[in-house]
Image: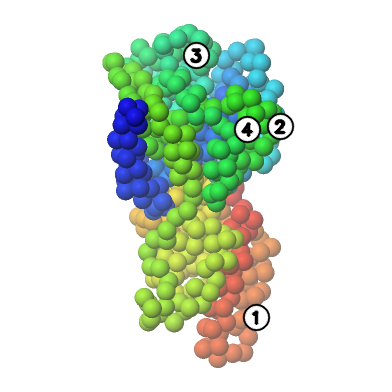
Amino acid sequence: MKNFIKIVPVYLLTLFFVFFVKIPHLKAHIQPPSRYIIIETDGSPDDLRAISMLFADNANQILGIIGSGGAVSAYSSCTKARNLLFEYAHQGIPVAMGTENSSTLPYSHLASDSVSWGMVAPKSKFETADELLNRITKHTNYTITLIALGSMSTYAQWLKKDNKNPKRIDRILWYGNFDSSSVLNLAMDKNSAEYIKNSGIQIECFKNNIFLYPIDTNYINHLIKIKSVYGQNIVQSHSHYCLQEYISADSLHMWSDVIPLYLGVPIIFQKSTIGNISSLSMSKNLPAEFIYSLVTGILSEDSPSFGQVFRSESMPEMPFVGEIVAIKENCIAKNGIMEWENMVHYTTWHGYSNINGLLAVKMITRLKEYFDAPGLALEIYISQNSDKEFANAASLCNGDFLKTKYLKSKHSESMPPIIYAVFFGTKVMITLKPELWKRVLHELDELEAKQSEKQKLEKHKKYFLEKWESLDRNTAFEILPTK
């Protein structure tokens, strides 16, 4: 009874926090992020869970991932991180190689190495951790939160090279602590941990009291129930026979995944601070069922539409409302809620007869998915002679007309439309594949053939709806690096 009395206040406060404070923020795609994060991983399976949870929380803007040696080699960590980004369609987030840490990998490295993090991505050269950290901190006015899921070696090496670097860091969240040399992430490089400890940077580290919460069939069953690419990928990766053996032996627990849980629901953690070091531990005796429900809440991607909800009774003056309602279910099933929300926002103001507007919405949606930046306005560049609806739709969907710049170069109407974008120093261009643009031009010509203006308008509207539903932004567009 005494234990019950102790946990009830925390339990009730957590419920209040999650349902009245946290969930509205998690669910709203248009909210700007409140944290700008760079992650260092050593390639262990718990890091896969942690990174997935960090992506799922829209309060986080992930700016880059560094793969270091630890559970696996640095190269393997980088490869796993890149595969994970391709699995989640966030290929625009850069991956860099950090320190190797040790020539001797732990006994569990074969199991960690064999677990797939996602689809196999094309091979490419990884930049160095210093290059990534320097570029991102140079191109942002925000202070950065560093997350260390392994040792602190990579961050320490970077911080030593420029005395301005610590000023760019808000804090470091470290899955490790200074209490015991037996802690693996401390033991891998104690000198680096001590250097950062003495740098004055705020460090939040986590004590190993989380063995109460196993990664077991109960945990997996919670994730199976949610419609989330993040949750589904965790379930898929943990079906690997090596992890199944650990699960059967009760040897797999919540480890580094407590960091995104802390960011999402800090109220369930106890914190003690001495100087610049804060030690965090989870409140004792919280039921595992409750913790797993919090995890699935963070991983869930469900989101209410922003702006107008298309119901004929709420907007009777809009004659196309019923037609949009008819395709809503299929559009969301095929292309996701974010594209649906963006397209609804555009059509509310501009109607739906201009195919260039549709292409712009899908292109900006793809760019925001590519950089995992649903709540940020990108810096975009469009040719000054681009179709007016194309430019308006791109700016509206991006969320900030002031972020749209116009290039002096002319754009030929025979060429597919192009948007250039810059995101924390990374420059890309997105365009419709040439063969698809030729098909669009041919289909538009057919719509114009010997018909009255009213007939043309009706056919353009029908064509718009067809492309809205059928054009897959992940296969229709090319994203290429540019200078």
- Marks 2/1: CA distance? 55 Å
Specify the amino acid type for callout 2: Tyr
Lower position in the chain sequence, tag 2 or tag 3 = 3
- Marks 1/3: CA distance? 69 Å
Q: Which residue is mark 4?
A: 80
Q: Which residue is mark 3?
A: 183
Nearer the observer, 147 or 246: 246
- Element assignment for label 2: helix
The mark lying in front, picked from 2 and 4, is 2
Specify the amino acid type for callout 1: Glu
Specify the amino acid type for callout 3: Val
Lower position in the chain sequence, tag 1 or tag 3 = 3
> Horizontal and vertical percent for residue 65?
52, 32
The mark lying in front, picked from 2 and 3, is 2
Q: Is residue 315 rendered to the left or right of residue 123? A: left
- Marks 2/3: CA distance? 27 Å
Q: Which residue is mark 1?
A: 446
- Marks 3/4: CA distance? 24 Å
Q: Tell me which residue sits at (32%, 27%) in the image.
A: 2
Lower position in the chain sequence, tag 3 or tag 4 = 4
Q: Tell me which residue sits at (28%, 15%) in the image.
A: 275
Q: Which residue is mark 2?
A: 241
